[in-house]
Amino acid sequence: MINPTTPPLWERWLKGLFGGFAAVLLFAMMSLTFIDVILRYWFNAPIPGGFEVTELLLASLIFCGLPLVTMENEHVSVDLFDKFIPGSWRRWQDLVILIACNVCVGVLAWRMWLKARESQGYGDITSVLELPLAPVFPLASFALAITVLIFLILLLRRVKSDRISPSEHIPNA
């Protein structure tokens, strides 16, 4: 029998994949920054193009983190109007928000895929080290597409649930 608190296999696999990749990217950024600071202040010789590499790593890290944040439902949310919305409408509010997020992220995934193809075709590179930008865009598009699937699963779960538990919303203070 499966423990109800154990996440499904696909969820554990995605967390391992994106979490592991995000950890490697974060460690690389930290190491690069550490070495760059040491070289800059002690030897007056910063790493050439260190800022460019950090930019590429950061962009990749952000897109790898998006599916993780979505799976845990940890997005930043503003509850300015929650106190004006009756409790019976909250289910519909959640559904509308999930649909809107899904559409927006879906459009971003599609546009990022087009940008990946365009970047590959043009041979876009960074200005100092002339590193290709093309690998970042497919990664971002893939992470956004996975995020769309996660939003779809969250939407289906929300539709299937009969009620909203009080713990899902932060009480108005």
Image (tube, helix red, strand yellow):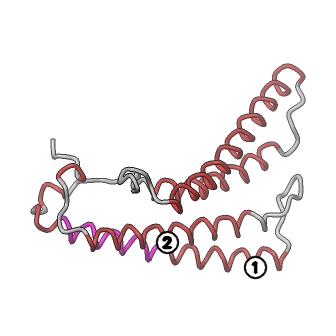
Coordinates of residue 34 in the picture (x, y in percent): 76, 29
**Quadrant placement of the C terminus:** top left
For the residues labelled 1 and 2, say whether their Cβ atoms are less than 8 Å apart: no
* Residue designated by label 2: 148
Coordinates of residue 56 in the picture (x, y in percent): 73, 54
Marked residue nearer the N-terminal end (1 or 2):
1
Residue 86 is left or right of residue 70, and the answer is left
Specify the label residue 135 is tagged with: none
**Residue 71: image location, x then y, percent:** 45, 58
Helix, strand or loop for the magenta stretch, by majority: helix
Cα gap from disc 1 to disc 2, whole angstroms: 22 Å
Residue at which label 1 appears: 118
Point 81% across, 32% down: residue: 36
How packed is label 1: few (under 14 Cα within 10 Å), some, or many (20 or more)?
A: some
The residue shown at (16%, 46%) is 172
In the image, the segment drawn in magenta is: 90-105
Asked if residue 50 lies left or right of residue 138, the reply is: right
Under mark 2, the amino acid is Val
